[in-house]
Amino acid sequence: MKAIVLDRFGGPDVLHEAEAELPEPGPGQVRVRVRAAGVNPLDGKIRSGALQAVFPTPLPAIPGLELAGVVDALGDGVSEVAVGDEVLGFADTGSYAEYALASTFAVKPDALSWEQAVTLPVAGEAAERVLRQLGVSAGQTLLIHGAAGGVGTLAVQLAVAAGVRVIATAGPGNQDYLASLGATPTPYGPGLVERVRALAPQGIDAAFDVAGKGALPDLIELRGGTERLVTIADFAAEQLGVTFSAVQERSASDLAALADLAAQGRLSTTVAATYPLAEADAAHRASDAGHVRGKLVLTIP
């Protein structure tokens, strides 16, 4: 099968197309003929080697954490889907490939395109996990820093639907986008503390750092400490006493619920751009540059 292979760490140019062995599903796994693979900021950090101390990646490796596609083969014990069913889920083997294995998956609703479906697994899991950790509830105020990307887009909507007031930061070009999701937008960068205090004179109840980029000191100041402050992007968290949330809590039922909400139009997802599999390096350049609205997706006809 064709796959994108990483055999040394470095910039996007280390990604290249190659022939790889077809994976065989084990117990509880399905093999999926991949139609769309999500590109996440974490993929770039793994590719660069920056996460070797935290998430060691043996080389050579096929990148990719999430997929949408057609079930091609079943491992022992799989009864909830059949060969030919359309699914979305988390990749056990790299999803930047024509075929990948998955053990946490859900049936794809017909109303969702492949590209829409693949925006949900990683971003949805991270958004729901951190909102649970923060314990935000109706009537409270949540600050989401860097909210225009895939995780932020879903976190804003899930929090707003729960009755939470969301103040969301992003670049100038994404202010109207965040407002359309139900958030009160404000630019990030110098003066963030003053801008947020003007929007929430009573203070904020919790803060979710999606983007990193050195904002934790400002968020600590806004919170008056590190309680109910979580980051998924800033590796300075430990030295600042901030919770870094990294361990995925994969749930097939949660994924199915998110897919149903999206299919009903009650949860919007945004595909920032699509790239053919062979142009994974270009997708990584776009991801590394930041300021992406929604999710970047690799498509495999």
Image (cartoon, rainbow, N blue to C red):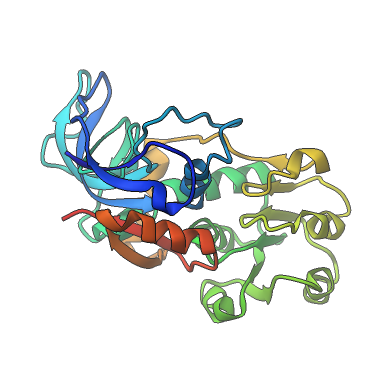
Residue 240 percent across, percent down from the top left? 82, 43
* Res. 107 visible in picture: no
Residue drawn where x is 54% and y is 64% of the image: 290
Residue 262 percent across, percent down from the top left? 36, 59
Q: Quadrant of the C terminus?
A: bottom left
- 276 relative position to 45: left or right: left
Residue 41 percent across, percent down from the top left? 50, 52
Task: Name above or below for residue 251 compared with residue 229.
Answer: above
Q: Quadrant of residue 23?
A: top left
Q: Quadrant of residue 53?
A: top right
Q: How many marks do you count on the picture? A: 0
Task: Name above or below for residue 25 compared with residue 211.
Answer: above
- 59 relative position to 27: left or right: right
- 268 relative position to 174: left or right: left
Residue 280 percent across, percent down from the top left? 34, 54
Residue drawn where x is 70% and y is 62% of the image: 143
* Res. 70 visible in picture: yes
Q: Quadrant of residue 167?
A: bottom right
Residue pushed farthest left?
Answer: 84
Task: Name above or below for residue 198 compared with residue 134.
Answer: below
The foreground one among 80 and 35 is 35
Task: Name above or below for residue 243 compared with residue 161.
Answer: above
Q: Quadrant of the N terminus?
A: top left
- 123 relative position to 206: left or right: left
The foreground one among 198 and 136 is 198
Residue drawn where x is 51% and y is 36% of the image: 248
